Amino acid sequence: MKSSLLLALLTLAPAEVVVREGESLAQVAQRALGDRGGASELKALNGLKDDAVAPGTKLKLPGPDRARAQSVLETARNAVKHADSKVTRREEAAAKLKEAEAHFQSARYEDAAQAADGAWKLLSASASQPTAFTVAVDDKGATTVESRSGQPVRVEAEGVTRPVYVGESVRVEKGQPPPPSRPSLGTPHPTQPADKLKLSVQFAKGGLGSVLLAWQAVEGAEGYEVELVPTRGEKRVLTASAPQLKASLPPGSYRWSVRAVARDVRSEASTEQGFELMEAPAKPIHLQVQPSKWK
């Protein structure tokens, strides 16, 4: 298994782009690079001081080294994400990956590739389990590789390389490149209720009150899993098809987090938040007394 991720990718791209009327730097990045976040790269490459660019301005675009850095970064991201929390130097690898992301945003693509490759090597050198995998070839010449334990296995065919993580299996048809890695999902960000908020609600006869949990939607998510942990009682895992969930709960204190799901892909859990559910005071009854007509 090769330890280096520095893949030689040749990608032809135009050398420059012309800013159109009414176009923001983020829109230029979306049109030229396919990524609005690439605005910071264009800004660094062209020595811009702010995001305001006059129409007709010619902007220099990244060269092939950007695609190479992207490939190394994506593989390093997956390696850090799938690494067991007990793996030695995982935190160091995560810090190295963060450094690589910063280099990439500043258009220092070679530095980004080197740092991302360093993150991979840190995890590869500190595997907590021996790497184990199986390879099976069927009658039609298709090869299936399954990773059982340890570090990801690198599968290469037709000039394309991709990692296979523990628990994954990849089928490569004869004469074809391996299928792309399964997409990763972003981590949801809770928005409601605010952390440590005390909620006063009216409880029904069954002793349950309603609370709305909400979070930012994640692109590519097909659903969400909400983990709800009361101070007293058992943990509950609830599912939602939209980025919100109305839960009926008894009074008490709760901690909760949410993750995005899509088929066999699950995101990292969000930052855990807390809230307290208590009964609202009864509303006073106001009686209106009409004056008597009797004298």
Image (spheres, rainbow, N blue to C red):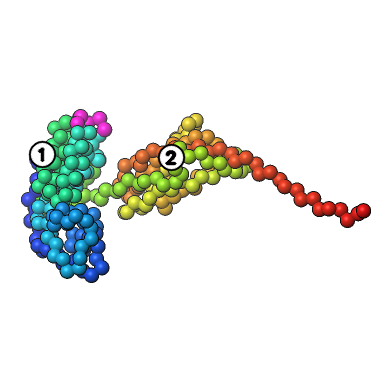
Residue 35: percent from left, percent from top: 22, 57
Q: Is residue 34 visible?
A: no
Residue type at the position of mark 1 = Ser
Residue at image coords 23%, 60% = 52
Mark pair 1, 2: CA separation: 42 Å
Q: Nearer the viewer, mark 1 or mark 2?
A: 2
Helix, strand or loop for disc 1: loop
Residue at image coords 20%, 68% = 55
On screen, residue 30 versus residue 232, left or right, reads left
Label 1 vs 2, first from the N-terminus = 1
Helix, strand or loop for disc 2: loop
The residue under label 2 is 195
Residue 295: percent from left, percent from top: 92, 53
The residue under label 1 is 3
Q: Please say whether residue 179 is one of the residues in the magenta stretch.
A: no
Q: Nearest the camera: 279 or 185?
A: 279
Q: Is residue 265 visible?
A: yes
- What segment carries the magenta color? 85-89
